Image (cartoon, rainbow, N blue to C red):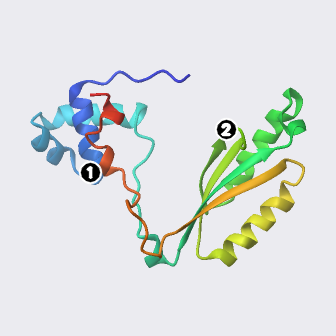
Amino acid sequence: MIGMTKLRETDYKILCELIKNSKASDRQLARKIGVSQPTVTRRRARLEKEVIDSYTAIPNWPKLGYNLIVITLVKARMEALTKKTYEPTRMRGIEFFDKKSNVIMAGTCQGPRADFFMISIHKNYSEYDTFIRKYRLEWTDFIQDLEFVLVNLAGGEIMKPLSMECLEESKLLFGT
């Protein structure tokens, strides 16, 4: 298990504000949370080193022509999960996913019907179909079964859009 970084109340306040607006300057943050700008600069540098993975924008995907997010669950063949084959297969996976710009997250998971998952974004079902066909062919020695969930981003049925703002003062994130 990865050790949890110990944060001060000021760190949480800075993090909350950055979740709401990652473009905020240190001066703006200092004014908002009531500390000095040098304190924010110092604490932000530590957060960026130890806690913040990256700053990113979440686009309106359909406006960019991407209408489908797919969560794919992969059940691996038992022989692919042995002590001898696991690490080479893992390294092959890292190299594979590094080349797939439409895969936004991938890794191992726990569940009765899945050992691995990937979350990918596609312009349409036809593009996804081509992508998953190539994936099956390249990983045929590894895959026992695939399950997937298709999320139509352009269909008007998204009940809560993807956003990190909901975490900004969340008990889930900060345990308060």
Q: Residues within 10 Å of mark 1 (few under 14, many from 20)?
A: some
Indicate whether 164 appears above or below 69: above
Under circle 2, the secondary element is loop
On screen, residue 25 above or below 90 = below
Q: Is residue 31 left or right of residue 11?
A: left
Report if residue 42 is visible in the image: no
- Percent x, y of residue 44: 29, 36
Q: Nearer the viewer, residue 158 or 40?
A: 158
- Classify 10 Å Cα crowding around label 2: few (below 14), some (14-19), many (20 and above): few
Image quarter of residue 29:
top left
The image position of residue 77, as x and y in percent, is 86, 42
Three-letter amino acid code at the position of disc 2: Gly
Residue at (74% x, 64% y) in the render: 132
Q: Earlier in the sequence, mark 2 or mark 1?
A: 1
- Determine the residue positioned at 84% across, 54% down: 139
Q: Contact (CB < 8 A) between labels 2 and 1?
A: no
Relative side of 147 to 64, left or right: right
The quadrant in which the C terminus is found is top left
Residue at 88% across / 54% down in the picture?
Answer: 140
Nearer to me, 174 or 11: 174
Q: CA distance from mark 2 to mark 1?
A: 33 Å
Height in image: 162 above or below 2? below
Picture layout, residue 157 above or below residue 136 = below
Q: Which mark is residue 20?
A: 1
Q: Report the amino acid beneath label 1.
A: Lys
Task: Decide which of 19, 46 is in the foreground and name it.
Answer: 19
Residue 169 image point, x, y percent: 25, 40
Q: Can see residue 91?
A: yes
Q: Describe residue 63's horizontal placement relative to residue 142 as left or right.
A: left
Q: Quadrant of residue 71?
A: bottom right
Residue 111 tag number: 2
